[in-house]
Amino acid sequence: MSSDPSPFMRHLQHCNSATLQGGRAPFSLAGTPAGWITPALFDRLENAGLGSRAQGFDLPHPDRLEALGETLATEGYYKSHHEVFDVMPDLGEPVLGRIDRGALPLFGLVAVGVHMNGLVRTPRGLHLWVGRRAANKRLDPSKLDHLVAGGMPAGHTPFEALTKEAAEEASIGPELAAQATQTGRIVYALNREEGLRRDILYCYDLYLPESFTPAAADGEVESFALIALEEAFRIVRDTDDFKFNVNLVLIDLFLRQGLIDPSSPEGRMLRAGLDKGLSPASPGRTLARA
């Protein structure tokens, strides 16, 4: 797939750039494989008696993972988000522990998020609400983003996280958010400055009335714009203006809306890449689309 010239495939390739082990060491929670330790933590975890870079690391008491993450933040290994996520070895498996979301890439742990296409049917065709991320955002400042997108906090279901983010990011009330429909999920694994991202994105569509105007309630969005779906198609095809993972959710939308022919060779290749990813997503497992 690396030789495919498709301008859309490059987004999938970027989001599936991780190789495992790739210099990392396996990480387990009470013996259950869960992630991959970044080399920056090798000495720290070896000194704590949690294993070795050669044999891998294991935290025998997973209920202590959150405290370990907090300690690492105070020691400067990452900057805390002050938002705790559930830790699971793979999709649909039991939660093993919790940790601040900012520590997830250091441990190569699975993170779950939600993304929603805010769509409007108009006399001029289908349009999409997009937001521009605030310039002070820690990750991908000033990039274009979905109307609603965010991580899934500990104890939440994907739809509960979507409802929470819809209210905070676009002032969408629970009754309107309840009309969103899940369209699938996307998985990928990539290297980022913050570490190894192994993400699962639950994807939704919400058709909004023409009278709706979003308003950011949490200060994370600089502005909103309603653009033709064809314009979003052009931006994804020709630029990197959207936040990296938003491109994947939009490519899925383009396939479902027929802007990319799903039966064409390119469409089939993109569909396969979105459904299963292009690289291993977890130790010994491959995550698949719902």
Image: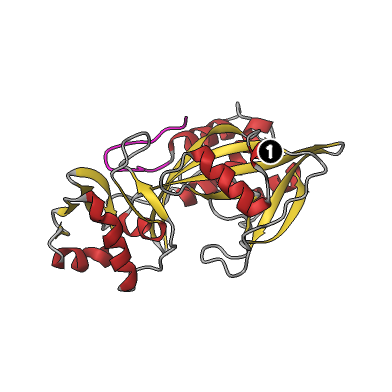
x and y, in percent, of residue 245 in the image: 53, 50
Residue 131 among magenta residues: no
Q: How many marks?
A: 1
The disc labelled 1 sits on which kind of residue?
Leu
For residue 54, what is the image quadrant? Answer: bottom left
Tell me if residue 71 can be seen.
yes
- In the rendered structure, which segment of residues is drawn in magenta? 278-290
Q: What predominant SS class does the magenta segment belong to?
A: loop
x and y, in percent, of residue 218 in the image: 62, 60
The residue at the point 22 percent across, 48 percent down is 29
For this view, does 168 lie left or right of residue 208?
Answer: left
x and y, in percent, of residue 37 in the image: 27, 57
Q: Which of the colour schemes (rainbow, by chain, secondary structure, one colour) is used?
A: secondary structure
Q: Is residue 125 above or below residue 136?
A: above
Tell me if residue 38 can be seen.
no
Residue 284 among magenta residues: yes
Q: In this view, does 165 lie above or below 177?
A: below
Q: Check disc 1: other Cα within 10 Å, few if <14, some if 14-19, many if 20+.
A: some
Question: Who is closer to the viewer here, 174 or 158?
Answer: 174
The residue at the point 66 percent across, 49 percent down is 147
The residue at the point 54 percent across, 54 percent down is 244
Q: Residue farthest to the top?
A: 263
